[in-house]
Image (spheres, coloured by chain):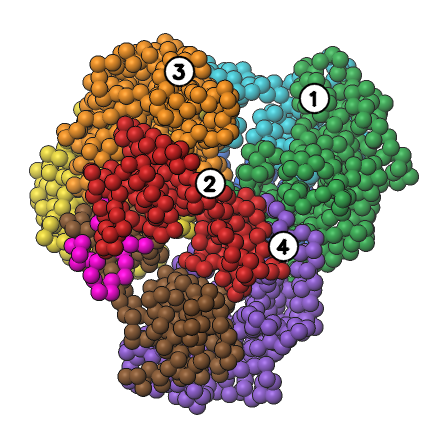
Chain colours: A purple, B green, C yellow, D orange, E brown, F red, G blue, H cyan
Amino acid sequence: MAAKSRYPTGVHPLLVEETARRRRIEARFVDTFEKASFSEVILPIIDYVEPYAPLVDSAAAKQSYRFIDREGDLVAIRADFTPMLARALSPTLDAGTLPLRLFYRGDVIRVEASRLGTNRELFQIGAEIVGDDSIDADVAMLHLAAELGRTDESEPAVVYNDVSIATSLIAQSDAVREALAAKRMTAGVPAALRTIVAKLISGEATIDDVAPFAPEAAARLCAIGDALASDSLFSLHLDDIDGSAGYYTGLRFRVYAGRARAKVAQGGRYDTLYERFGQRAAAIGFTFTLDDLD
Amino acid sequence: MAAKSRYPTGVHPLLVEETARRRRIEARFVDTFEKASFSEVILPIIDYVEPYAPLVDSAAAKQSYRFIDREGDLVAIRADFTPMLARALSPTLDAGTLPLRLFYRGDVIRVEASRLGTNRELFQIGAEIVGDDSIDADVAMLHLAAELGRTDESEPAVVYNDVSIATSLIAQSDAVREALAAKRMTAGVPAALRTIVAKLISGEATIDDVAPFAPEAAARLCAIGDALASDSLFSLHLDDIDGSAGYYTGLRFRVYAGRARAKVAQGGRYDTLYERFGQRAAAIGFTFTLDDLD
Amino acid sequence: MAAKSRYPTGVHPLLVEETARRRRIEARFVDTFEKASFSEVILPIIDYVEPYAPLVDSAAAKQSYRFIDREGDLVAIRADFTPMLARALSPTLDAGTLPLRLFYRGDVIRVEASRLGTNRELFQIGAEIVGDDSIDADVAMLHLAAELGRTDESEPAVVYNDVSIATSLIAQSDAVREALAAKRMTAGVPAALRTIVAKLISGEATIDDVAPFAPEAAARLCAIGDALASDSLFSLHLDDIDGSAGYYTGLRFRVYAGRARAKVAQGGRYDTLYERFGQRAAAIGFTFTLDDLD
Amino acid sequence: MAAKSRYPTGVHPLLVEETARRRRIEARFVDTFEKASFSEVILPIIDYVEPYAPLVDSAAAKQSYRFIDREGDLVAIRADFTPMLARALSPTLDAGTLPLRLFYRGDVIRVEASRLGTNRELFQIGAEIVGDDSIDADVAMLHLAAELGRTDESEPAVVYNDVSIATSLIAQSDAVREALAAKRMTAGVPAALRTIVAKLISGEATIDDVAPFAPEAAARLCAIGDALASDSLFSLHLDDIDGSAGYYTGLRFRVYAGRARAKVAQGGRYDTLYERFGQRAAAIGFTFTLDDLD
Amino acid sequence: MRIAIPKGRLQDRALGVFAGAGYNVPTDNDLKTRKLVFERDGIEWIFVKDGDVPVYVEHGAADAGIAGLDQILEHECTAYQPVEFPFGRCRMMLIAAPDAPPLTKVATKYPRITRQFLESRGIRAEIVPLNGSVELAAVLNLTSHVVDLVETGETVRVHHLELQDVIAEISPRLIVGKNFYRTEQKLVRDMITRIEEAMNVAR
Amino acid sequence: MRIAIPKGRLQDRALGVFAGAGYNVPTDNDLKTRKLVFERDGIEWIFVKDGDVPVYVEHGAADAGIAGLDQILEHECTAYQPVEFPFGRCRMMLIAAPDAPPLTKVATKYPRITRQFLESRGIRAEIVPLNGSVELAAVLNLTSHVVDLVETGETVRVHHLELQDVIAEISPRLIVGKNFYRTEQKLVRDMITRIEEAMNVAR
Amino acid sequence: MRIAIPKGRLQDRALGVFAGAGYNVPTDNDLKTRKLVFERDGIEWIFVKDGDVPVYVEHGAADAGIAGLDQILEHECTAYQPVEFPFGRCRMMLIAAPDAPPLTKVATKYPRITRQFLESRGIRAEIVPLNGSVELAAVLNLTSHVVDLVETGETVRVHHLELQDVIAEISPRLIVGKNFYRTEQKLVRDMITRIEEAMNVAR
Amino acid sequence: MRIAIPKGRLQDRALGVFAGAGYNVPTDNDLKTRKLVFERDGIEWIFVKDGDVPVYVEHGAADAGIAGLDQILEHECTAYQPVEFPFGRCRMMLIAAPDAPPLTKVATKYPRITRQFLESRGIRAEIVPLNGSVELAAVLNLTSHVVDLVETGETVRVHHLELQDVIAEISPRLIVGKNFYRTEQKLVRDMITRIEEAMNVAR
């Protein structure tokens, strides 16, 4: 229990051993990314808040360090890479150069203790394919994420889904959001949706069940399923649905690893994110989060 | 003149080419450091201001981004690695493990336009030997800095000196500070010091000249000179003296590289810095600064 | 040239004489307001930025001190009373109690040097009638403002207009904004508007001229004109039009006082401001600004 | 339970009734102060932190809103009037004009929930005599404070003491601090002090008891006691001692009022405070705190 | 699989739920011992303070459990709540002392819920966190108001307190950790089905 | 004068203190009723959760009371502590699970005391606040470490936990509100004297 | 009424404007003297550096004047601009050295205009403020780029600089202070009318 | 080596210094041309606005030059100042209009120096930056005070302005860029020596 000096919430120095460990992990990821011909970009540790305002709800905004700079602008310390990447790339994107395969790494710093007092420094490393809305891209990223989630002692589990299913149902009745979030049917859910919602909650729902409500998503999930079929690491959980999809527009997946089945990565498709920064471009990506306290 | 989005003062994203360039440079440094058996540590991007207060004059303090965190503490974004390293190491230092050979890298972010409007993002990479006050350590670091300053097209110039000379003279009369800073004799310099100060200004001063005023420094510089003798990259400029020595206590050096003879690195000895963080330990280090605008 | 300590931009202490002067002025205003049966409210010196976001353009926002509080919310030091009053009153407003006659006083602190380096601490004192959209209210406030603008040595000049005239013209062509702002006809102004715009610029425009474009405004201005007719302090300047009306929706006026004809007060009608804070209520008010540097 | 909008910690608007109440109270104080020929000064709502640094422990500093301004300086919102008054006056003080009788009023804003979640907006109004170290001044201020503490339904209680007694004892052994703070003898208290400390704790101590340890304080307290003798509102509590005296140097007193015997004011002598701002001047003052939540 | 059972008020009903669903739960004799963990047919049953069930599940130290909505909300627990139980319902209420002044100080065992409630109403008030006997705070003038669960309303009547506002309808729920739910669907779904069927039978 | 008595662990000793000092305290029969406030010879006796005594005194809802140093510290209570009692002493300790890793997560009923302890040691760790059975957290791997009171050390031994560090020596104290102490010196001093004398006799 | 005339480049044309409008302006002989203020028929004519005209009008030290749009923009002057003149037009341009690298450092006499231009283009660059001979900065490699007025383009050609971008079309304008305009409408309108008529005649 | 010569006031004296030190400097005829850069014996002579000399040297676009202390301070130029010249001395002064009120607004060509002066005096005042004829600002009531160089004091006398305070003694200096000084010691020292000798002769 070596005494260390106190540091601001969300940061601490890494001494020799910790650094060596961190660099080993980085090396493994970088190597895998480069083999898959992804190129690295470096994103700034701070950026203005305003360009991301429409993307970040105020709760999330308050999880990052924010301050007023000398020009009087509101600035935040990096807490999420994906939108930063979109903002950084947009000005220079052009159809000719797409698709791009990029990766990034670095610390994200969260100031706010989460609900239950957790408060940890996080190192993130992620990858993204910009300008390719194909199912092949989806499958490629799922495989890449699975490969990176593999550890010596255990295989990862990759759970995937398509947020547009929930989005389309919630669009018809907001009561669906609560039901799916709690995994429990509620009175508010309209008759027309009770069957499908019940099936989603009970986990019996099949792609055919959701097809009428989200045909495109269903089609894509079929195709993805076929492509992954052989592989037991991947499982489709149609009910694995967040209340709010954030900037995700389609495929959504999470990687669980180790014996503890801890969530180590998450990602998905955000085909409208780049538009917000002035360039239309489909994109799919994922981010691994390394917790230095583990 | 591709249009880019605006970023806060002192930061910007590095796209593929810029990142590749940055990583190449890093790799070269890291390789050299590791060959010389230096180990890396990672220092936090933000830290409290208070522990460094005695080290940083208010002008310098205002060059870094500073803000109040959620606990009400004043926090600053990293603007100088050396004191951070001392603070990070102090709690775990013990005589048994010394000397340590460490290196670090990362961005430093300065908010304030310097006098003439310069305002650039800086990547720094540096090394330090902790717990070794020997002349061998001085020489080793001078050689290491010179090696890293070497480029394909040109040899570096390493100008070195000992701040304790100026410190001891200034201790006798503050007028000396101004004279040495301006390189011009001023009325205020007391008679007893006019000869040595004149010689320092005119550049005629020899180690023998300064010995009476700073015998230890003179002795060390002699020894260092002998050790470097053969090497034309190194030159002793006894008059190369800053008004204020900052946290430096002895040897001080700068590396100039390229045709433009731009200053690319600086460093020196700060044998009292660790004390301030609770552990006595001699230390010598240097920092290279890469300017992404170049 | 008594030396004083330095204070943050926009504030300084008032010593005995300055305070006496300030209190005398306050007393005169308060007395007048209370005679006119206005009641005082006290508004907080800081408030959240978010509720006012739609009302404040980012340039204006940057003129006030802003910072992140311990909960992570963006807070600003008071820089404009009118919207704060609306926010403070809205929750407790109800038709039964309207109309209300209120006044307020206090410092506003601006952090940003205006275009030409001006940078002054300002004391503001203002009044407002909430829940009365009558022309009588307009006239009452114009008279009250004039009375307060009167000084021993000189009569004030009250210049008034109706922003909805410009608003309606600009709605038809944005080129009108520039022409009215510069007081110079520009190529961009559409043929249909050239006559009226030319007349507005040259100052020949009459209420009849603008009636076709803004009948309601014209009608109100006629009525106000009749009510004021006798009084030479008031003059209608149909061309006295800001590029942007801010939160004003109708009558707009300014008070010029003293030999220097300096602007000492401004105000107008903002019948939609309260809605933004959840309560529909017409409102008209004005604010006098006392510059402690004068 | 009328719903109000949420405001930042420590502030809220005062509507008509609350404002009227506030102004009534102000008027009563101002009237009393002016009758006693005190003149008002107005102190800024924000000021730099640095000039007060030596006076404010970091815990107290964190109780005020603090932020970095556009020049990069640390600024705080007013949380204590007394040192601000000293800073504001020092530059213009000169022996010729002393003594000065001054008063001030305004909000103080505390950001930090106190230990038990209390968190209230405070209006303070206080007075000070600068440049008069006489016992007459002490007595005058005690009477003035008592007069202001009187309410229609009840008499105030003024408890006074001299901090230099505790200071001198604590100077001999820090263990005394803890004993006096807890009102319980502790093992740490040295034999030589046990008797006096025990008497102070048990409340049996007389001025004669403390005289040997703090002769000057004893002498002043005698004189003050004689001057007040007749008056039952005042009681000397030799044991009413804070662990730390802050900037107080001698007489210290508190006013308790109302049936609840709530503390409504506190004050004392701070003869060295002005020195810190460059002007030697004795000073005694007190501050009443009005809690808008009561 | 580790299941957390809340000690106290809900304990028997909670055990009843699982027993009814055919689980081999610890017996009363078991519980007489000082033990707090019991293994039965590969399931670990742990008994913790009712307020701690969401903490164990949120941190993955328990895979599932039974907790009142009051504790779920107070801990902002993100676990799924697939089953809501018909028993042990009550209300989170704002309660005032007789002739209470406007709310400026409120005592409660639920500071987070109370703060959210106050902010939603835009009320400035000081929250005084207590460990128990919350109504007493209003009786003894520690605070003019309190926020607490009201089941029978007995205490409120006895002390002539005033029920001013309903903050939330509270009911016990089966909670299941998100990661466990996602990675052990079979186990989870089987448990939910068995519990739901048992409940329907019970009706 | 209103005096707060902590329910539970310290209740009998606390009442004993005042009885011994000649105060007419509520009897066991009184306490059998559901009442929580008792008036005797002009003194109001109130019974509150032990953790709430400092809250009542700090807020002036009680003039004096008896509280453990653990609760006084956890609430950063500023009341005077004129008497320290010889009974009910224990220790606030840092306790680790068997073969615990370095401390990064610690469960406790005393988050404020724990945070101050960790910061004084410069340890980065997540604090998990619990309501009870804190040692269980270490047993069940909710956290590797816990901070809790240790009296007999029984639980610790049973579960082979490791006592790593003493954070504070805990004892019950008589606490008196600052304002009450300053404005009612006679009453206060009389009470303290009577209690101290009684204690000395008892020795 | 006080009117500010810009010394140098625009001086004669500016005086011509007012002379043409029938004002009694200072003569060349007047100007030979060291005087800088001249009273004629109740109008005060002052002669200031061209860059200072907007400053005098903005601060009310002059009621009206003639200034180039470059100076009006650089000072963010809020005065009205009722008349734009046909003479002395030029362009504010971004100029690059031969084979210049991407813009990272730019010299200029107009730092505010340059900053706004760079930000509108989202370019990070260091602005080096200069007092004169701005093109020289590019020739001597002080900076790779400069922002300056281009009239004939002579210097640019001589040094083979490259015109990269037009930032603004610049022309001289009659400017009138806002307060003066609002409170002295007759005077102002009369002046504007006379000047406009004279200009039309001139055409 | 590139040397920057300030155009205007100091130009002839500056060239004289180098000519006296035996340097082959551009002739008057050279200067009649529009050229601004001249190569002589491997030294490049450039002619820039006096205020720009420190900028060129600071940025390394010139290796050395001659500049007044006013410009060196205003640009916070860090170059060495090895030689101070006896000619062209003057004073930076605070000047007031007749019967000026307390300073609240001051015009100047030296905003940075003025701000530092005001702050050192703890004076709150608005600084109005001007390009020239600064004294005029006080005469025309643009501002009550101005900060400017005073050589002869002629203008001040003519307009009955009041010299209130000396801000700095100003003299021209030889300035040498830090990096150049450190990496080209021989060249630099030779130049300094020749200039100093020439000056001594001149005395």
The answer to whether tags 1 and 2 share a subunit is no
Marker disc for residue B182:
none
In the picture, residue B52 is in which quadrant?
Answer: top right
Q: Is the residue under label 4 in contact with that under label 3 (CB below 8 Å)?
A: no
Q: Is the residue under label 2 in contact with that under label 4 (CB below 8 Å)?
A: no
Is residue D141 visible from the viewing direction of this image? yes
The answer to whether tags 2 and 3 share a subunit is yes
Residue type highlighted by circle 2: Ile
Marker disc for residue D68:
2
Residue under pointer 3: D209
Marker disc for residue G102:
4
Q: Secondary structure at mark 4?
A: loop
Q: Residue at the far right: name it.
A: B230
Q: Position of residue E165 (x, y in %)?
A: 21, 60
The answer to whether tags 4 and 2 share a subunit is no
Q: Secondary structure at mark 1?
A: helix
Q: Secondary structure at mark 2?
A: strand
**Closer to the observer: label 3 or label 4?**
3
Residue type highlighted by circle 1: Ile
